[in-house]
Amino acid sequence: MSSRDEFRPLPLPRPRRIDAVRNHEQILAAADQLFAEQDPRTVTMDQIAKAAGVGRATLYRRFPDPRSVAAALLDEHERLLQGRLAYGPPPLGPGAPAAERLAAFYAAAVELLERHLPLALGAGAGPARFGTDGYRHWRGHVRALLAEAGVADPDACADIALSPLAPEAYQHQRHTLGLGPERIVHALGALARTVLSGAATHPDEDRLG
């Protein structure tokens, strides 16, 4: 190999075609409207393709099922919250006690659900929720807060602490019981402060070996 070949620059990746970008945006916009207009769990790929004005083959090249479309829409909103958790000001971001950070996380997650509940239901309701990237991120964050507060078994408690944020649970509270988001946030904040303040007071009590 000559020195000229060794230092030849790699070819740049080909930019996405304009029509591919347009199709992607049309699919997401159409799906967003469908998820808002009907039960997200009933939306079909045929409906999305028809509403977006694209062929089924075009749709399936990008997404295998309606859940993946909803997940793509929800992902952008969740990434903003993930950034705030990692780099934002306290109490949501670093620098506040664990109990206050958990309470702030609950408030931010409720705000996300209030704005995007149809997407959350479509993207990860039921058992599928536990396999989403968003859930894994939230679980890691909450587990770290529980461990910081001295909770005896943060691995077991992380999913319990996240259970009030299940999309079905929030839908039940808001639309069956008629609870307002402020009331839900207040209750979750009180729960976070009570549980984690107690753990901090007795960090070694009942700790599993």
Image (cartoon, rainbow, N blue to C red):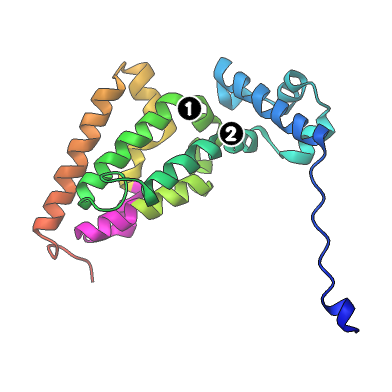
> CB under 8 Å between callouts 2 and 1?
yes
Taking the spot 8% from the left edge, 57% from the top edge, the residue there is 201
Taking the spot 28% from the left edge, 54% from the top edge, the residue there is 145
Count of marks, rendered view: 2
Q: Nearer the viewer, residue 110 or 67?
A: 110
Instruction: Give the position of the C terminus as an image quadrant.
Output: bottom left
Q: Is residue 92 left or right of residue 65?
A: left
Residue 66 x, y percent position in the rendering:
65, 32
Check the image and name the residue furthest to the left: 201
Classify 184 as above or below 190.
above
User: Which span is picked out in magenta?
Assistant: 142-159
Q: Which residue is mark 1?
A: 116
Q: Amino acid at mark 1?
A: His
Q: CA distance from mark 2 to mark 1?
A: 9 Å
Q: Callout 1: 10 Å neighbours few (<14), some, many (20+)?
A: some
| Dominant secondary structure, magenta | helix
Q: Which residue is mark 2?
A: 73
Q: Is residue 143 left or right of residue 66?
A: left
